[in-house]
Protein backbone atom coordinates (compact mmCIF):
# COMPACT_ATOMS: atom_id res chain seq x y z
CA UNK A 1 0.00 0.00 0.00
CA UNK A 2 2.76 2.49 0.82
CA UNK A 3 2.37 5.86 2.48
CA UNK A 4 2.06 8.20 -0.51
CA UNK A 5 -0.83 10.65 -0.46
CA UNK A 6 -2.19 13.15 -2.95
CA UNK A 7 -2.83 16.55 -1.40
CA UNK A 8 -5.47 18.53 -3.27
CA UNK A 9 -4.84 22.26 -3.08
CA UNK A 10 -7.42 24.20 -5.06
CA UNK A 11 -7.15 22.86 -8.61
CA UNK A 12 -3.70 21.35 -7.98
CA UNK A 13 -2.63 17.92 -6.85
CA UNK A 14 0.64 17.42 -5.01
CA UNK A 15 1.96 13.92 -4.33
CA UNK A 16 3.75 13.50 -0.98
CA UNK A 17 5.65 10.41 0.06
CA UNK A 18 8.58 9.18 2.11
CA UNK A 19 11.86 7.81 0.77
CA UNK A 20 12.12 4.12 -0.04
CA UNK A 21 12.92 2.13 3.05
CA UNK A 22 11.49 4.71 5.44
CA UNK A 23 9.54 2.38 7.67
CA UNK A 24 9.48 -0.08 4.77
CA UNK A 25 6.59 1.75 3.08
CA UNK A 26 7.93 4.79 1.23
CA UNK A 27 8.31 4.75 -2.53
CA UNK A 28 9.86 8.23 -2.96
CA UNK A 29 7.16 9.25 -5.46
CA UNK A 30 7.12 12.82 -4.17
CA UNK A 31 8.63 15.17 -1.60
CA UNK A 32 8.21 14.38 2.08
CA UNK A 33 5.80 16.43 4.20
CA UNK A 34 8.82 18.11 5.84
CA UNK A 35 10.34 18.98 2.45
CA UNK A 36 6.98 20.42 1.41
CA UNK A 37 6.84 22.56 4.55
CA UNK A 38 10.38 23.84 3.89
CA UNK A 39 9.48 24.59 0.26
CA UNK A 40 6.41 26.56 1.43
CA UNK A 41 8.50 28.66 3.82
CA UNK A 42 11.26 29.22 1.24
CA UNK A 43 8.77 30.17 -1.49
CA UNK A 44 6.94 32.55 0.85
CA UNK A 45 10.21 34.24 1.82
CA UNK A 46 11.27 34.64 -1.82
CA UNK A 47 7.86 36.07 -2.78
CA UNK A 48 7.89 38.44 0.19
CA UNK A 49 11.35 39.68 -0.80
CA UNK A 50 10.35 40.14 -4.46
CA UNK A 51 7.38 42.30 -3.42
CA UNK A 52 9.52 44.35 -1.03
CA UNK A 53 12.35 44.87 -3.56
CA UNK A 54 9.87 45.86 -6.29
CA UNK A 55 8.41 48.56 -4.00
CA UNK A 56 11.86 49.85 -3.09
CA UNK A 57 13.21 49.72 -6.66
CA UNK A 58 16.36 47.92 -5.51
CA UNK A 59 18.60 46.03 -7.93
CA UNK A 60 17.96 42.39 -7.07
CA UNK A 61 18.22 39.98 -9.98
CA UNK A 62 17.71 36.65 -8.26
CA UNK A 63 16.82 35.15 -4.89
CA UNK A 64 17.68 31.63 -3.80
CA UNK A 65 16.40 30.28 -0.50
CA UNK A 66 17.73 26.92 0.62
CA UNK A 67 16.41 25.27 3.76
CA UNK A 68 17.23 22.21 5.78
CA UNK A 69 15.63 20.99 8.98
CA UNK A 70 16.53 18.80 11.90
CA UNK A 71 15.40 18.15 15.43
CA UNK A 72 17.74 19.56 18.07
CA UNK A 73 17.00 18.94 21.75
CA UNK A 74 13.37 18.23 20.89
CA UNK A 75 12.91 21.42 18.85
CA UNK A 76 12.31 21.49 15.09
CA UNK A 77 15.08 23.74 13.72
CA UNK A 78 15.07 25.18 10.19
CA UNK A 79 18.39 26.43 8.83
CA UNK A 80 18.07 28.97 6.02
CA UNK A 81 20.66 29.97 3.45
CA UNK A 82 19.54 33.11 1.62
CA UNK A 83 21.46 34.04 -1.53
CA UNK A 84 20.77 37.46 -3.02
CA UNK A 85 22.12 38.24 -6.49
CA UNK A 86 22.15 41.96 -7.13
CA UNK A 87 23.85 45.27 -6.47
CA UNK A 88 22.91 45.64 -2.82
CA UNK A 89 24.85 47.30 -0.03
CA UNK A 90 25.34 45.80 3.44
CA UNK A 91 22.36 47.66 4.91
CA UNK A 92 20.03 46.51 2.12
CA UNK A 93 21.15 42.88 2.54
CA UNK A 94 20.58 43.08 6.30
CA UNK A 95 17.12 44.56 5.75
CA UNK A 96 16.22 41.78 3.31
CA UNK A 97 17.25 39.14 5.87
CA UNK A 98 14.93 40.82 8.35
CA UNK A 99 12.06 41.06 5.82
CA UNK A 100 12.44 37.39 4.80
CA UNK A 101 11.67 36.41 8.39
CA UNK A 102 8.38 38.27 8.23
CA UNK A 103 6.75 36.18 5.51
CA UNK A 104 3.27 34.95 6.49
CA UNK A 105 4.15 31.25 6.40
CA UNK A 106 7.17 31.70 8.66
CA UNK A 107 5.09 33.78 11.05
CA UNK A 108 2.47 31.04 11.12
CA UNK A 109 4.89 28.27 12.01
CA UNK A 110 6.92 30.28 14.52
CA UNK A 111 3.89 31.63 16.34
CA UNK A 112 1.50 29.64 18.46
CA UNK A 113 0.04 26.94 16.22
CA UNK A 114 -2.93 24.76 17.11
CA UNK A 115 -4.61 22.07 15.04
CA UNK A 116 -8.30 21.68 15.85
CA UNK A 117 -10.93 19.36 14.47
CA UNK A 118 -13.62 20.90 12.26
CA UNK A 119 -17.17 20.61 13.60
CA UNK A 120 -19.17 17.78 12.12
Image: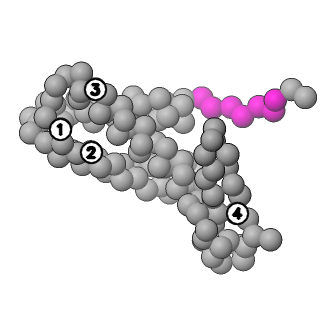
Q: Residue at x 17, y 46 (%)?
A: 85
Q: Is residue 33 above or below residue 4?
A: above
Q: Residue at x 63, y 38 (%)?
A: 10
Residue 68 at what x, y percent from top left? 43, 56
Please state, as top left, top right, bottom left or bottom right, where the C terminus lies in the image.
top right
Which residue is the extreme one toward the right?
A: 120
Residue 91 at what x, y percent from top left? 13, 30
Q: Earlier in the sequence, mark 3 or mark 2?
A: 3
Spatial CA distance of label 4 from label 2 is: 31 Å
Confirm whether the magenta stretch covers residue 117.
Answer: yes
What's the magenta region?
112-118
Q: Earlier in the sequence, mark 4 or mark 2?
A: 4
Spatial CA distance of label 4 from label 3 is: 37 Å
Q: Earlier in the sequence, mark 3 or mark 1?
A: 3
Q: Residue at x 15, y 29 (%)?
A: 58
- Say if mark 4 contacts mark 1, CB within 8 Å: no
Q: For the residue labelled by badge 4, is the local secondary structure a helix, a strand or a loop?
A: loop
Spatial CA distance of label 1 from label 2 is: 8 Å
Q: Is residue 18 above or below residue 56?
A: below
Q: Which mark is residue 63?
A: 2
Spatial CA distance of label 3 from label 1 is: 11 Å
Count residues near mark 1 (Cα–Cα under 10 Å), then give few for <14, some for 14-19, many for 20+: some
Camera-side residue of 113 and 18:
18
Confirm whether the magenta stretch covers residue 82.
Answer: no
Count residues near mark 4 (Cα–Cα under 10 Å), then give few for <14, some for 14-19, many for 20+: some
Residue 116 at what x, y percent from top left? 77, 31
Q: How would you classify the magenta stretch by its main secondary structure? A: loop
Q: For the residue labelled by badge 2, is the local secondary structure a helix, a strand or a loop?
A: strand
Which residue was labeled with disc 4? 4
Spatial CA distance of label 3 from label 2 is: 12 Å
Amino acid sequence: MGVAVDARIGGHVLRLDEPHGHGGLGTDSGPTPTETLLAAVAACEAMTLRLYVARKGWDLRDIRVRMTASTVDGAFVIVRKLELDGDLDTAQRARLLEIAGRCPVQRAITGQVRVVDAPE
